[in-house]
Amino acid sequence: MTDQRPLRILIMAAEMVPFVKTGQVADVIAGLARALRRLGHDVRVAIPRYNHVDLDRFGLSPVMDPFPVPMDGHHDSVSVFQTGFGATSAEMGVPVYMMDNPRYFGRGVGALRHQDADPFIFFPRATLEMLRQPSLSWAPDVIHCHDWQTALVPNWLSLTYRDDPILKNVSTVLTIHRLSHQGIFGYRVLEVAGIREHGFLYHSGITDLGELVDIMGRGIYYADAVTTVSPTYAQEILTPEAGERLDPLLRDRRDALFGILNGIDTELYDPASDRHISATYDATSLSRRAANKRALQKAFGLDALDAPLIGMVSRLVESKGVDLVAAMIEPVVRYLGAQIAILGVGDPKYHSLLTELTARYPEQLSVRLTFDESLERLIYAGSDMFLMPSRVEPCGLGQMLAMRYGSVPIVRATGGLADTVDDYDACSGEGTGFCFREIDPVAMYTAVVRACQVYQMGERWRELQLQGMARDFSWRASAERYVTAYCWAMNAHQHQPRQETGWVG
């Protein structure tokens, strides 16, 4: 596509900072929207209005009169509120639309579960109906859907709205943040969504698609383009090992699949101005960073030792490799003399195990079973190394934030970790961290040993820190790649419309 005019883009997601956050998707939506606006595109965002989102606090005002939304053979009313995001004296903010209906979102985001289908049928359907209201006078070139909560949109646009004068020319891009969350339900969902007559999907390589409603699978099938959050993860999900049983469908759509790395907010996360840390610094004043290490040791109750300090901010679950960490804590603290500071919550069995290990090594191991933004920032700014031994990591932001703050990542080379961390080469001195591939405690321990050895080489370690700090993980480059995907999707929608095939009644 050669048309370089500014695009009209609607981003649709279940969450977005600063309004609501349950995970990293909320940060991604905000960062991407702001970067697209800075590139000159007319980007807007649609999210639900959960009950905790205060109208006055966020400056929400009604956009139009309430209107009906088709749901389960009848209609429910929706109110639409609007506010702006990211406005500064130098640039306009991103318009944010919030779909409001107390029946679906009155319980708040914390009450919603992965098995709740109706709210995430109502929200995207209401958003599409909003675009059809004459008072809006705006329609996107492309709708960018995120995860299963919005993945019915490509399905509806391909079938229900295929002849709608406003929506028939709108293309769709679906981003998969975590393929394991697919939105799997029974036949009843087809009735609620108004697509019962089309039945289940059929795929010869995925037999159960003809027996259940996989919302993510339907989005992958019908979207004009599909993206995921790192190039390596895009390749991994084409395999049975990481494809969460949808790999045959993803292989069919390989030509429309893009792996685009997430960015980070380099203004919000900046060691030169971060108000959460004890001492600000940059690449020219790295010696000031030592004050943050002392502050981190004090905050976690660790002795003020001149030893390698390993930080970890994570959900404490098996997919994040916490079992590998637990298995190697004793040799790390006993034989390497390192300290470990862990922040996060998760599986109670890991809470118990890590608490028990902390009691054995109180001078060198400390765990805070919570999520705390100030402590998170202090770990980035004060740890010498940042550990991410994930089994699965579609993108990951922690390793990028750690490098920005001068903490050297130790990661398993999977997904976005493989795409962002270059394994240190002792001969050339090149690299930004330490990588291992096997899902094995000894492989992880070997990477930690390598890191501790280089840590003892003062000047080499400083060079390694600076190489990580020099990496550009800002949103601009990622946003430009998304624009390429949008243009690809628009071209595909115009010239290669999705076919009405693949159903079973």
Image: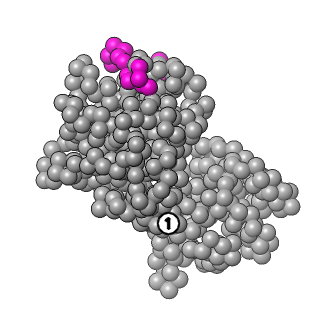
Residue that carries the numbered disc 1 in the rendered image: 240
- Residue 343 in view (yes/no): no
The magenta segment is 56-74
For this orientation, the residue located farthest to the front is 505
**Residue drawn at (64%, 62%) of the image:** 321
For this orientation, the residue located farthest to the top is 65
Relative to 212, is 487 on the left or the right? Answer: left
Relative to 141, is 411 on the left or the right? Answer: right
Query: Which structural element holds mark 1?
Result: loop
Where residue 422 appears, x then y in whole percent?
47, 72
For this orientation, the residue located farthest to the right is 360
**Label 1 Cα crowd, 10 Å radius (few <14 / some 14-19 / many 20+):** few
Verify whether residue 59 appears in magenta: yes
Quarter residue 125 falls in: top left
Indicate the quadrant containing the C terminus: top left, top right, bottom left or bottom right.
top left
Where residue 311 appears, x then y in whole percent?
65, 59
Where residue 230 appears, x then y in whole percent?
42, 60
Verify whether residue 101 appears in magenta: no
For this orientation, the residue located farthest to the left is 2
**Residue drawn at (32%, 26%) of the image:** 129
Colour mapping: one colour
Which is more toward the observer, 418 or 239?
Answer: 239
**Residue drawn at (58%, 49%) of the image:** 377
Where residue 130 appears, x then y in whole percent?
32, 25
**Residue drawn at (19%, 42%) of the image:** 6
**Amino acid tagged 1:** Pro
- Residue 481 in view (yes/no): yes
Looking at the picture, does residue 50 appear above or below residue 398? above
